[in-house]
């Protein structure tokens, strides 16, 4: 995939959605956005109970799915920390957490952003949400012994699912 390529999406949630890549894969991120993990790394570590992007793998590089922990049904054992970590998409919609043309939410936005799509207004909203998620790291630091990476596993799994470092 290269700058200028047109991506056409046809999956369960979107039909004939199109976007053009404006940056090289993994490059030209906003200065305020420095995720710890790439989508490929997140999928390999285990996120969203394996039930994410299952019907839209053609949109993204095949290499992202090499060794990914993917399942047709949610399975919390596929998560890195082995805990339940997802809410139904209906809850996300009810709470107003879905923005712009990404019906699956933040991680779908991140995958498309990482791939090279840029939508300035949507990007600013999602980057602000990503930055706000660091509050979980503060709670872990305040309540866990150093190096006890399995203390507060739900919060650590949430950090991982937002591309933050849960292993500090």
Image (cartoon, rainbow, N blue to C red):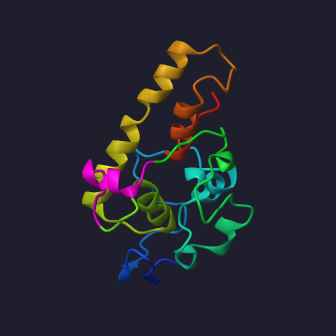
- Residue 104 is situated, as x and y percent measured from the top left of the image, at 40, 62
- Residue 28 is situated, as x and y percent measured from the top left of the image, at 46, 59
Q: Is residue 95 magenta?
A: yes
In the rendered view, would you say 47 is above or below 61? above
Position of the C terminus by quadrant: top right
Q: Is residue 112 magenta?
A: no
Q: Name which residue lies at 66% across and 16% down.
A: 146
In the rendered view, would you say 94 is above or below 62? above
Position of the N terminus by quadrant: bottom right
Q: Name which residue lies at 69% across and 60% down.
A: 68
> How many numbered discs, if any?
0
Image check: 33 left or right of 120? right
Image check: 115 left or right of 91? right
| Residue 35 appears anywhere in the view | no
Q: Name which residue lies at 36% across and 35% down.
A: 132
Q: Which residues are magenta?
A: 87-100
Name the quadrant containing residue 112. Answer: bottom left
- Residue 76 is situated, as x and y percent measured from the top left of the image, at 62, 46
- Residue 38 is situated, as x and y percent measured from the top left of the image, at 59, 54
* Along the viewing direction, whichever of 60 and 30 lies nearer the viewer: 60
| Residue 125 appears anywhere in the view | yes
Name the quadrant containing residue 43. Answer: bottom right
Image check: 103 left or right of 164? left
Image check: 100 left or right of 114? left
Q: Name which residue lies at 29% across and 55% down.
A: 93
In the rendered view, would you say 84 is above or below 43? above
């Amino acid at each position: 995939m290269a700058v200028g390529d047109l991506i056409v999406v046809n999956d369960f949630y979107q039909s004939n959605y199109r976007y053009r890549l404006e940056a090289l894969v993994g490059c030209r991120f906003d200065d305020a956005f420095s995720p710890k993990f790439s989508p490929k790394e997140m999928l390999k570590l285990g996120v969203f109970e394996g039930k994410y992007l299952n019907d839209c793998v053609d949109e993204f590089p095949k290499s992202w799915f090499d060794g990914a922990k993917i399942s047709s049904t949610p399975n919390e054992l596929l998560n890195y920390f082995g805990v339940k970590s997802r809410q139904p998409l209906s809850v996300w919609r009810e709470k107003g957490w879905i923005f712009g043309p990404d019906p699956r939410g933040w991680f779908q936005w991140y995958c498309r952003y990482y791939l090279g799509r840029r939508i300035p207004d949507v990007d600013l909203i999602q980057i602000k949400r990503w930055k706000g998620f660091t509050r979980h790291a503060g709670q872990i630091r305040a309540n866990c012994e150093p190096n006890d990476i399995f203390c507060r596993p739900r919060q650590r799994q949430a950090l991982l699912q937002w591309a933050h470092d849960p292993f500090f």
